[in-house]
Amino acid sequence: MNRSQQQYYKRDYAQAKAEGKPFFPYAVYKDLLIATLAIGIVIALAIWQRVGVGEPVNPASTDFVPRPEWYFFFLFELLKIFKGQSALTPVIMATFIVPNILMALLILTPFIDRSPERRLQRRPIALFSGIAVVIFLCYMTYKGGSSEEGVGAEGLQLTGLESDAAAQAGSALWLANCTSCHMIKNVGQPGPGPNLTEVGTRDVISAETAEQFLQNPPPGMPPFANFTPEQYTEIGTFLSGLGTTYK
């Protein structure tokens, strides 16, 4: 702030202080009025747009696409933007790096634009930063809310499955039962079980070994004794080809 700006600020402040209105009751009255109006709008919206009760949860469903609440749609969209790079890149970028960059811009704006001016047209840096962040968040929220698919909802993107009905059935079994502990090509969870993307190149898996392994799993892994012999064959066919036939 240069000398002329300091003098202008002091004159403007002295004039505002001489002609201004007291905090009580003027400011208190305005705050109370706006707070009452805001609460009334929230109550009216809650009455007008009631939250509906959906269908009962079906734990056996294999086509359910999980979606977050609306205020997390922009993070939801960020996860999809960075998907397919590695197991941790979407999570790190969408939940740590990008939000912290936005937060840093918000914190640094007063230090970058130190003009005493309060008029918006004379605060271009602060105005541009605020508008850019709001537009970005609104756009990402809209994209996340209008998306037809969730993260990983497209299923396993593997070549070779389309020509093998047994492997297709095995992949469906894996998606329905194993994604909470294992991952294949960034679909599923990166733990506590191992990544199975290349399991066919490391282990010889057949219908017999799959049945034996799934019925008598190691400690910490639930048994799958409810599978039929045909399902053991299907998932064995699928797992044995991962990394070789199905990539």
Image (cartoon, grey):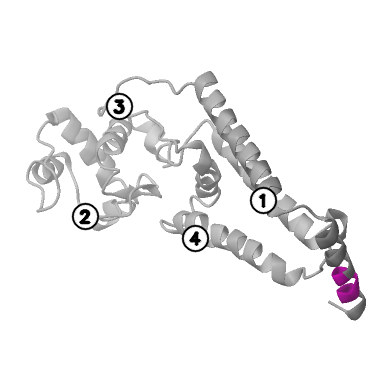
Picture disc at residue 203? 2
Instruction: Give the magenta part as a residue range.
Output: 5-10
Q: Is residue 109 magenta?
A: no
Q: Residue 136's spot in the image, x, y percent? A: 66, 48
Q: What residue would you read off at disc 4?
A: 96
Q: Residue 242's spot in the image, x, y percent? A: 32, 47
Picture disc at residue 24? 1
Above or below, 36 relative to 99: above
- Name the mark nearer the viewer: 2 or 1: 1
- Name the mark nearer the viewer: 1 or 3: 1
Disc 1 from disc 4: Cα separation = 43 Å
Residue 4 in sight in this render: yes
Q: Is residue 6 magenta?
A: yes
Name the residue located 15 percent from the left edge and 43 percent from the top edge: 210
| Mark earlier in primary sequence (1, 4) | 1
Picture disc at residue 36? none
Q: Are marks 2 and 4 in contact (CB under 8 Å)?
A: no
Disc 2 from disc 4: Cα separation = 36 Å
Above or below, 184 relative to 145: below
Q: Residues within 10 Å of mark 2 (few under 14, many from 20)?
A: few
Above or below, 155 relative to 100: above
| Mark earlier in primary sequence (2, 1) | 1
Name the residue located 64 percent from the left edge and 61 percent from the top edge: 106
| Mark earlier in primary sequence (3, 4) | 3
Q: What residue would you read off at disc 3?
A: 61
Q: Are marks 3 and 4 in contact (CB under 8 Å)?
A: no
